[in-house]
Image (cartoon, helix red, strand yellow):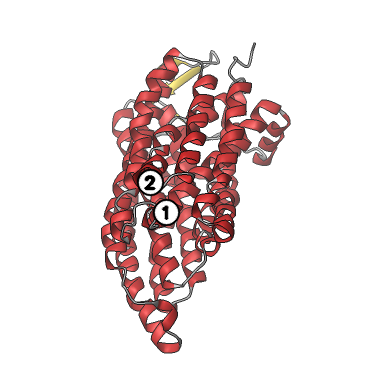
Amino acid sequence: MAIPTPTSTTAAPSKDGAEAVVPQNAASLQTFVFALFFVFGGITSLNDVIIPKLKDLFTLSYAQAMLVQSAFFAAYFFVSIPAASIVQRIGYMRSAVVGLLTMAAGCLLFIPASYSGVFVTFLLALFVLASGITIVQVVANPLISMLGKPQTASSRLTFAQAFNSLGTTVFPYVGAILILGSLATVDVSTLSGAALDAYRQEETRVVVNTYIGLAIALALLGGAVWMNRRKLVETAAPSENILHAFDLLKQPRFALGALCIFLYVGAEVAIGSIIVNYLMESSVLGMGAEEAGKHVPLYWGGAMVGRFIGAALLRLFSPGKVLACAAAVTIALLLVSANTTGAVSGWSLLAIGLFNSIMFPTIFTLACEGLGKRAAEGSGVICVAIVGGAVVPLITGFAADAAGLKMSLIVPALCYAVIVYFGLYARRSHKA
């Protein structure tokens, strides 16, 4: 997958011996990229607040409510490769604008979704929103690596991910106040016909108002990026068939790593999706919807803190071993939560965010180790694997309907078990 590269008069040696170019105004461009990480991380985490709201309004089962995540993360499967093609054709900055405006369009689709009062229309709006996020993510990950010296690329990416975690911490808290704070005490199952439609339209207005605000913010950010698009001068790369990237799956280490990205994202999203309803359970903390929603940032905030701790640990120990240990602790926390009650049950589930922190970047690095010049192609394939966020939560929802929320935790536990294996499998260097 050939992609454009930035041009500059400042050069630094790259890892493969070629000369890497660094834009002279890299610092100002990094500000935009950090903003992108903050925005797409925050909006993605809002799903954890939207799910209990829509579940109540449309009297959905857990499996049906998880379709929110399925519609959202399906975009990674369908849009990642076309997004890479867009970057190939028009470059990073212009692609970022396309992604931001697509996100704004998805937010505005919540308006007709509210007036229709039909659950499926919300899923369509979420899919369009996630399509924009996918484009932005395909842009942001490699771009932040280019905006500086190759030797410090990992540091910049970790710092950028901290902004992503900041978004996932802030947005759910504000969303809980704006969206769940108005969750009515009306028993929706007692309504029907016009009364039910009117109730849904009224209650979904708080969702609409939230996303209209986001649409305005996204349009302004898109305008700012567009006005600064010429700050990054890019040299067009030759067009190639980007589907060839999938032959990397013939390599066992990379294929297992891609599978673990699929399972990790799915498990992380599944747990985040059930937190509100889980904490509302009388056998756990028995909280109200808004109060439970305000605890979601603790799950995602743990990931932000864990990234700083993990960055230090990864300098001292084998990344594979650290990954295996983190996944093993996560399984233990899931077992504790499922087999206890009260505060222990609730807080052990929230603590999982701390150990999730290092998983995505560590799996990504271990999977792509040894790919050399094909690392960018590997990144594209791994981005497709994020579709696990569409599949695993749905399976978890079915398990929750069949056996209850506590027993449904076996689904993410099995996902983490595979990650433990991969960590042990990849604990040695690819060259070893």
The residue beneath circle 1 is: 278
Q: Residue at x 35, y 45 (%)?
A: 168
Q: Is residue 260 left or right of residue 337?
A: right
Up/down of 150 relative to 93, above or below: above
Q: Quadrant of residue 381?
A: top right
**Residue drawn 33% across and 37% down?**
163
| Residue at the bottom extreme, as displayed | 194
Q: Position of residue 62 (x, y in %)?
A: 51, 61
Pointers 1 and 2 in contact (CB under 8 A)? yes
Residue 280: x %, y % from top left: 37, 57
Horizontal relation, residue 281 to residue 119: left or right: left
Can you see residue 73?
yes
Nearer to me, 397 or 308: 397
Where does the image place residue 354, in percent across and percent down from the top left?
39, 34
Marker disc for residue 147: none
> Between 64 and 232, which is closer to the camera in this rendering?
64
Vertical position of residue 73 compared to residue 316: above or below: below
The percent position of residue 166, horizontal first and vertical second, equals: 31, 40
Element type at marker 2? helix
Report the residue at 50% width, 27% height from top: 362
The image quarter containing residue 250 is top right
Mark pair 1, 2: CA separation: 8 Å
Q: Pointer 1: residues within 10 angstroms few (<14), some, or many (20+)?
A: many
Left or right, 108 with respect to 318, comes to: left
Q: Amino acid at mark 2?
A: Gly
Residue at x 54%, y 39% (from the top left corner)? 264
Determine if residue 179 is in view: no
Label total for image:
2
Label of residue 346 in the image: 2
Amino acid type at circle 1 is: Tyr
Tell me if mark 2 has few (under 14), some (14-19) or many (20+) residues whose alpha carbon lies within 10 angstroms of its own.
many
